[in-house]
Image (tube, rainbow, N blue to C red):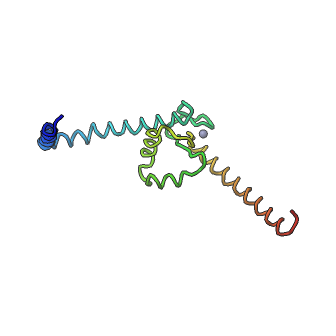
Amino acid sequence: MTLKSTEKKLESARRYREEHKESIKKWHQTIGKQREARLRITFKLDVLTHYGNGKLVCVMCGESRLACLSIDHINGNGCQERKKFGGNGYGYKFYRYLKKNDYPKGYQTLCMNCQFCKAFLDKSWNKVHERRKATQCLKMLAGSC
Ligand SMILES: [Zn+2]
């Protein structure tokens, strides 16, 4: 394709957009939004299914209601990653990121109940761990170990 024919096509497209401005706008407000919504749900379903070991379920309890399912960061670094994707719209951008990056490791599909249980158990474990460390320090200071 020559430069001249490319310029002609661009000019033709520009003219078409200008002449059909209203119908293009209407298309984006109806069909465009529907397609975008379909695309978003497709990303979500694909990603949740992949991290649910091939099923659209929570890997801990088997919950299958879509509204309850989410992606869990196995190592608990979700807060840092949310900042990377910038708060609002995190879900869609995040699902798209995971799919386009060929499903990186470190994630799993969990329902929100299992997410809360995991967070609770992690915090409890950390407290026990902190207590053990503090006890060891006290023993070291007392010269008993
Ligand atoms: Zn669950």
Task: Pick the residue in front: 104 or 71.
Answer: 104
Q: Is residue 84 visible?
A: yes
Q: Residue furthest bottom?
A: 141
Q: Quadrant of the N terminus?
A: top left
| Left or right, 139 with reference to 112 | right
Which image quadrant is residue 23 in?
Answer: top left
Ligand 1, image quadrant it occupies: top right
Q: Quadrant of the C terminus?
A: bottom right
Which image quadrant is residue 112 in?
Answer: top right
- In the image, residue 79 sits, relative to residue 74, either above or below, namely below
Which image quadrant is residue 109 in?
Answer: top right
Q: Residue furthest top?
A: 54
- In the image, residue 134 sits, relative to residue 14, either above or below, namely below
Image position, residue 101 (x, y; %): 46, 40
Image position, residue 19 (x, y; %): 11, 41
| Left or right, 35 with reference to 85 | left
| Left or right, 75 with reference to 82 | right
